[in-house]
Image: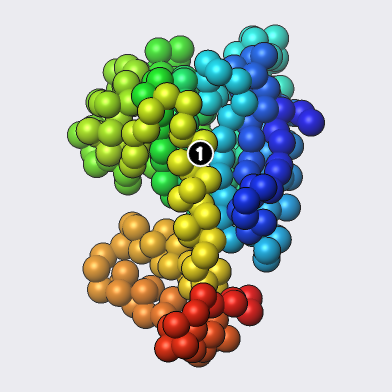
């Protein structure tokens, strides 16, 4: 439906998979697809039964090649301007999911596709992956968070290399640069991402969400302020039902049955 599919992992009901599902266009982001993605992210964010999310893509050749430039080529300046908040809502929907999100990248992840991956908490890429932010080569600036997310993930020099040259990185170079977290054999990124998401989903959903908030809020502040953010996260869960169940399960040598 409009280029995005939402499904649950067959092996783990607490893992949701958001699929970029427009393979005939290499999952290029159209206006309709952006609206659908924002709506799906809103649905997932509001579902307390979802503890971890995988962002994957249909088709063999690409994760996402960025904005649909064929659609954009036919748009007026006013239409492009009107499209902007729709696109921002799509990228923001992924970035602001309260659950941890694992990207499963294969093939081309360029422009907005690379930015979708950067919006996730972890990026798993298979050996076919090619990542880049080529916007400057067509007279644009990355507009889905690319300049800011690459800077935070990779550091200023490597982010500048990626953004200013517009060049593409192989999976090996992306791993070396810190753009991706794990490289896996061709065709296995989705399987690996689902495995990681399942491991996350076994843990306290209250604690995991609090930890994600602390890491996101603390990323751009000094150490002292960051430690205060962490302290607030700790206090938010220290007296929760999840903490009581987790400690009890540990002492009773059983798997926890999280109440949240």
Residue at x 40% of width, y 20% of height: 128
Residue at x 25% of width, y 73% of height: 224
User: In the figure, residue 133 lies in which quadrant?
Assistant: top left
Residue 47, image x, y percentages: 70, 61
Quick check: 9 left or right of 177? Answer: right
Q: Which residue is mark 1?
A: 191
**Local secondary structure at mark 1:** helix
Q: Is residue 88 above or below residue 206?
A: above
Q: Is residue 199 visible?
A: yes
Residue at x 30% of width, y 30% of height: 174
Q: Is residue 89 visible?
A: no
Front-lying residue, 48 or 252: 252
Front-lying residue, 150 or 79: 150
Q: From this viewpoint, which residue is outermost toward the front?
A: 253
Quick check: 17 left or right of 246? Answer: right
Q: Quadrant of the C terminus?
A: bottom right
Front-lying residue, 181 or 80: 181
Query: Is the image coloured rainbow, by chain, by secondary structure, or in one colour?
Result: rainbow
Quick check: 170 left or right of 26? Answer: left
Residue 113, image x, y percentages: 51, 28
Residue at x 64% of width, y 41% of height: 18
Q: Quadrant of the N terminus?
A: top right
Q: How many marks?
A: 1
Residue 193, image x, y percentages: 48, 43
Residue 35, image x, y percentages: 73, 36
Q: Is residue 45 above or below residue 140?
A: below
Counting other residues with Cα less than 10 Å from the Cα at mark 1, is it few (<14), some (14-19), or many (20 or more)? Answer: some
Quick check: 120 left or right of 170? Answer: right
User: In the figure, residue 52 lies in which quadrant?
Assistant: bottom right
């Amino acid at each position: 439906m409009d280029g995005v599919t939402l499904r649950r992992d067959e092996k783990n009901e607490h893992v949701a998979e958001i699929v970029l599902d427009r393979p005939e266009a290499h999952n290029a982001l159209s206006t309709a697809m952006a609206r659908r993605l924002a709506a799906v992210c809103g649905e997932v964010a509001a579902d307390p039964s979802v503890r971890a999310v995988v962002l994957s893509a249909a088709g063999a050749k690409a994760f996402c090649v960025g904005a649909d430039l064929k659609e954009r080529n036919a748009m007026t300046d006013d239409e492009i301007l009107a499209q902007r908040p729709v696109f921002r809502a799509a990228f923001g929907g992924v970035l602001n999911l309260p659950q941890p999100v694992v990207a499963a990248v294969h093939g081309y992840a360029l422009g907005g596709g690379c930015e979708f991956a950067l919006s996730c908490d972890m990026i798993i890429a298979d050996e076919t992956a090619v990542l880049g932010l080529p916007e400057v080569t067509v007279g644009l600036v990355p507009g889905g968070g690319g300049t800011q997310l690459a800077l935070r993930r990779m550091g200023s020099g490597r982010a500048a290399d990626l953004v200013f040259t517009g060049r593409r990185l192989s999976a090996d170079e992306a791993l070396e640069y810190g753009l991706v977290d794990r490289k896996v054999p061709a065709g296995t990124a989705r399987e690996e991402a689902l495995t990681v998401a399942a491991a996350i989903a076994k843990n306290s959903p209250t604690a995991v969400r609090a930890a994600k908030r602390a890491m996101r809020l603390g990323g751009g502040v000094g150490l002292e302020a960051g430690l205060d953010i962490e302290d607030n996260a700790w206090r938010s869960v220290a007296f929760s039902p999840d903490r009581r169940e987790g400690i009890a399960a540990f002492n009773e040598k059983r798997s926890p049955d999280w109440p949240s």
